[in-house]
Amino acid sequence: MLRALFIKLSESRSLRAAAERSAIGQRVSSRFVAGTQVEDALRATQAVNQLGSSVSIDNLGENVTNANEARASAQLYHQLLDEIAARKLNANISLKLTHMGLDVDEELARVLVSGLVSKAASTIPRNFVRVDMEGSPYTQRTLDFVYELHRMPGNQGAVGAVIQSYMRRAESDIAKLLAEGIRIRLCKGAYKEPEEIAFRKKSEVDANYVKLMKVLMKSGIYHGLATHDEGIIKEAKAFASRENIPRDAFEFQMLYGIRRDLQCSLVKQGWRMRVYIPFGTEWYPYLMRRLAERPANVLFIAKNLFR
């Protein structure tokens, strides 16, 4: 019930406008969002790097309404890639296709994203672009973009996809991505989807996650396991041990501000960890979806707010 509530709240334009302008909203979001400016994200990235974790930086935003907004979003990511290289940070970038203008002009989005992937591929050291997954109306279009980008000369290994374990098609999509050697971030998913295309029960989502996780870990391709679920993390560690999978053959991924203790513990144990650091003014939908994924975060936020 809470999950459905937060997904519904994430779609409310009026609540979003009020929250993003309010002082209390900005205070709540500060735990999970690095700030509003590029420099805020870079500062947070350096701090996380110093703790032994790599980073994926995301400029929050989606569904831009015109070409100029899309170009501005892409230019910001070019700036990020430049700064990551100049400051020698251990970080890559994550982006949404609708933030690059997919709803406005598909060809424009193609040009903008291919430019970023090409830049990441040619940077020294080589960088990487993660194309985030959005709601089901965009699933196939997003995967088609990733396939096309990955097939471009010089781009292999410089672009990856995200698969959500609550989607019933996830197993089939993973098989196709692996056949082309594409890196995958596996997560559970945080959009409202009809039951005919997505698992509803947490037990089903978790079981599918573990099943797909094992496929990825044995694939020989470097993937990211995005989860804060200690039970799933324990299963991944045990599976790696049983199958003699090296600790540097994959990485765990967690969100900025969530389970810092667990992040540090995994690093100390010798596992690879990547922290997803979002920044920007459009933080409201992101925060609501994180609460939908893990309603226990509501109590966590409340405790920090009253402190």
Image (cartoon, rainbow, N blue to C red):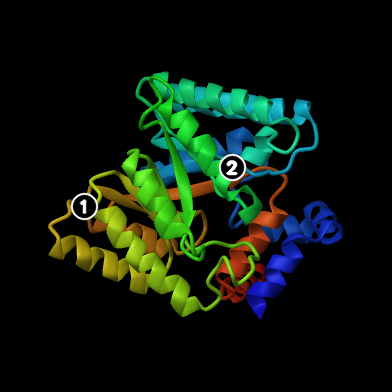
Residue 51 visible in the displayed image = no
What residue is shown with label 2? 141
Under circle 1, the secondary element is loop
Labels 1 and 2 touching (C-beta < 8 A): no
Q: Is residue 217 above or below residue 198?
A: above
Count of all numbered marks drawn on residues in the image? 2
Mark 2 nearby-residue class (10 Å; few <14, some 14–19, many ≥20)? some
Q: Estimate the x, y position of residue 12 in percent, counting from the top left.
A: 81, 61
Alpha-carbon distance for marks 1 and 2?
Answer: 33 Å
Could you classify mark 1 by the number of other residues whose Cα lies within 10 Å: few (under 14), some (14-19), or many (20 or more)? Answer: some
Amino acid of disc 1: Arg
Q: Nearer the viewer, residue 135 or 120?
A: 135
**Sequence-wise, which precedes: disc 1 or disc 2?**
2
Q: Split into 4 quadrants, where in the image is the C terminus?
A: bottom right
Drawn side of residue 210 relative to residue 93, left or right: left
Task: Work out whether 11 lies above or below 195.
Answer: above
Q: Secondary structure at mark 2?
A: helix
Query: Which residue is tagged 1?
Result: 247
Residue sitting at x 62%, y 67%: 291
Quadrant housing residue 107: top right
Kindly report which numbered mark, 1 or 2, lies closer to the viewer in this rendering.
2
- In the foreground, 274 or 160: 160
Amino acid under disc 2: Arg
Residue 285 position within the rendered picture, expressed as x and y whole percent measured from the top left: 70, 56
